[in-house]
Image (cartoon, helix red, strand yellow):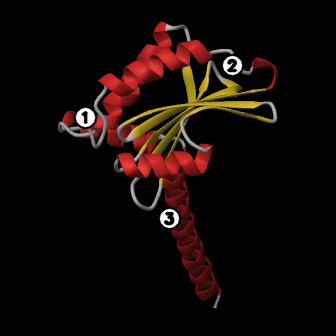
């Protein structure tokens, strides 16, 4: 009788351990998705196989900002259900200074998306927030500044965005 109880307890402990191990693995995979590790691994892999034009585009963007003593930090990445991609960064780790990069499936999608999100291209100011939207073909770079530091980097961002959008290949570039 005591052996039977010990056997039941032992089996229960083994089953609980297996379930906890699986749960930890699932949680670890989910964390990879949200901390950009999976994205970075995929970008490296795609670059090694000759794909991944957005990886090169984003590297060029980051290098151009570094050359102006502006680090792009706190990268976030989102892909919508149709494959449009959005990358967002803070400038020099400042949450009031944001760079958002939108890469759409095509130019028409970009025009619709930017109109919906920002009201179109150009300068948009409202309630202490400024959005500078610069786009070309299938992509747009948006500089958002708020609070006391509104427009701190406007001229540098405008110059960088126009150059990068014109010169760097992206997913749907010819």
Q: CA distance from mark 3 to mark 1?
A: 32 Å
**Which residue in the protein does label 1 denote?**
47
Badge 3 density bin: few <14, some 14–19, many ≥20, Cα 10 Å? few
**Which residue in the protein does label 2 denote?**
151
For discs 3 and 2, the disc positioned in front in the rendered view: 2
Taking the spot 39% from the left edge, 19% from the top edge, the residue there is 163
Could you say which disc has been placed on residue 141 in the image? none
Q: Position of residue 18 (x, y in %)?
A: 51, 68
For discs 3 and 1, the disc positioned in front in the rendered view: 1
Taking the spot 65% from the left edge, 23% from the top edge, the residue there is 93
Q: Earlier in the sequence, mark 2 or mark 1?
A: 1
**Which residue in the protein does label 3 denote?**
22
Establish if 144 lies above or below 8. Answer: above
Quadrant of the image occupied by residue 10 = bottom right
Q: Earlier in the sequence, mark 3 or mark 1?
A: 3
Please report contact status of discs 3 and 1: CB closer than 8 Å, yes or no.
Answer: no
């Amino acid at each position: 009788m005591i052996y039977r109880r010990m056997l039941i307890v032992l089996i229960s402990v083994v089953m609980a351990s297996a379930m906890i191990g699986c749960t930890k693995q699932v949680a670890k995979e989910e964390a990879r998705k949200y901390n950009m590790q999976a994205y970075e691994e995929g970008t490296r892999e795609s670059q090694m196989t000759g794909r991944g034009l957005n990886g090169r585009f984003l590297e060029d963007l980051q290098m151009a900002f570094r050359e102006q003593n502006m680090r792009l930090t706190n990268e976030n990445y989102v892909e919508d259900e149709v494959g449009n991609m959005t990358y967002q960064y803070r400038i020099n780790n400042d949450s009031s200074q944001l760079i958002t990069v939108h890469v759409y499936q095509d130019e028409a999608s970009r025009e619709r998306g930017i109109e919906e999100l920002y009201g179109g291209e150009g300068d948009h100011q409202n309630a202490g927030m400024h959005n500078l939207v610069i786009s070309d073909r299938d992509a747009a770079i948006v500089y958002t500044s708020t609070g006391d530091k509104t427009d701190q980097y406007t001229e540098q961002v405008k110059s960088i965005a126009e150059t990068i959008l014109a010169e760097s290949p992206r997913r749907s570039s010819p």
